[in-house]
């Protein structure tokens, strides 16, 4: 319950929409029960700076703008990790990333409803995004969540088993994942157009009623999208499995590219 209240609190903090700079409040039109929700899958790794940026600055809008009324969102915290022949998991950004991937996998397992586990994952990723690695545990207190189930999951080995499950699901993707963040909407990857997640959800929803945010997003877009593209050179920042850049360099590059993108939107 407290986690859902946290989402309402976040709405008050985030007044800039992914698709529009409008600060007016968002009302959600009633969605008929028979309308099939758009299926959204987010494949990421906890210390990838572009994944952090996507979760903290873009995916959050799916919830604060009421787009979750027409979309089922599932998170897969594994990314570009690899399972070795001996069963050990190696993460792209080191053991610390394996730790946070497991913590977030345990959170999803502990609180299966996305409205319960996403506030926690958002909170953790927000601390990681700003480099406050040692403050992530404060998310339990901030959201009035019991840390014991997540910590027991991690220490008991259940977290490791969850990671293996996420590995299987990630590695069996068709078409295969090329990089992270890797966002799939109704079975179609968005490639590096993942930042347009709201536009794509709204465009794929077949129900009779849309959240007003969809109309505002589409009507105010200065850069209409013809559809996701598998570009040889991604326009928006991504992390390939063989990317050996340091986390600091990647984060600086992510911040610079986000700044340039937002400046172009405002132009």
Image: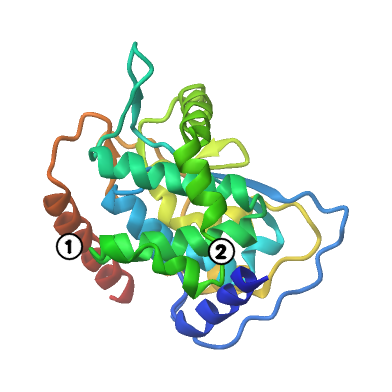
**Residue 95 picture location, percent across and down:** 26, 38
Q: Residue furthest bottom?
A: 24
Observer-nearest of 57 and 129? 129
**Residue 121 picture location, percent across and down:** 47, 58
What residue does disc 2 label? 62
- The residue lying at 33 percent from left, 65 percent from top is 127
Q: Look at the picture and state if 167 lies above or below 110.
A: above
- The residue lying at 81 percent from left, 65 percent from top is 31
**Residue 122 picture location, percent across and down:** 45, 62
What residue does disc 1 label? 256
Observer-nearest of 133 and 71? 133
How did the renderer colour the structure?
A: rainbow
- The residue lying at 43 percent from left, 65 percent from top is 123
Quadrant including the C terminus: bottom left
- The residue lying at 27 percent from left, 30 percent from top is 241
Apparent side of residue 148 relative to residue 88 in the rendered image (left or right): right
Q: Residue furthest top?
A: 85
Mark 1 lies on a secondary structure that is helix
**Mark 1 nearby-residue class (10 Å; few <14, some 14–19, many ≥20):** few
Quadrant including the N terminus: bottom right
Query: Quick check: can you spot residue 182?
Result: no
Apparent side of residue 187 relative to residue 142 in the rendered image (left or right): right
Among the 4 quarters of the image, the one containing residue 21: bottom left
Apparent side of residue 46 relative to residue 239 in the rendered image (left or right): right
**Residue 128 picture location, percent across and down:** 30, 60
Sequence order check, earlier mark of 2 and 1: 2
Query: Quick check: can you spot residue 242?
Result: yes
Distance from disc 2 to disc 1, alpha carbons, whole Å, reads 24 Å
Mark 2 lies on a secondary structure that is helix
């Amino acid at each position: 319950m407290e986690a859902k209240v946290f989402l309402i609190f976040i709405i008050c903090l985030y007044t800039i929409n992914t698709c529009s700079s409008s600060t007016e409040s968002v009302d959600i039109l009633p969605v008929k029960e028979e309308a099939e929700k758009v299926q959204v899958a987010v494949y990421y790794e906890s210390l990838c700076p572009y994944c952090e940026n996507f979760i903290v600055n873009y995916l959050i809008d799916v919830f604060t703008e009421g787009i979750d009324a027409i979309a089922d969102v599932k998170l897969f915290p594994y990314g570009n990790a690899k399972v070795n022949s001996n069963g050990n998991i190696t993460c792209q950004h080191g053991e610390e990333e394996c730790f946070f991937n497991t913590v977030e996998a345990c959170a999803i397992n502990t609180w299966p409803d996305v409205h319960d586990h996403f506030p926690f994952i958002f909170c953790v990723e927000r601390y990681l995004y700003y480099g406050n690695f040692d403050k992530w545990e404060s998310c339990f207190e901030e959201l009035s969540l019991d840390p014991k189930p997540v910590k027991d999951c991690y220490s008991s080995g259940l977290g490791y088993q969850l990671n293996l499950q996420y590995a299987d699901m990630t590695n069996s993707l068709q078409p295969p994942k090329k990089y992270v963040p890797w966002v799939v909407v109704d079975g179609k990857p968005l490639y590096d157009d993942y930042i347009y997640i709201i536009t794509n959800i709204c465009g794929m929803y077949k129900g009779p009623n849309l959240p007003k945010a969809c109309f505002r997003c589409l009507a105010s877009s200065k850069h209409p999208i013809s559809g996701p593209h598998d570009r040889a050179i991604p326009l928006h920042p991504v992390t390939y499995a063989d990317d050996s850049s340091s986390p600091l360099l990647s984060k600086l590059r992510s911040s610079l590219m986000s700044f340039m993108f937002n400046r172009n939107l405002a132009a």
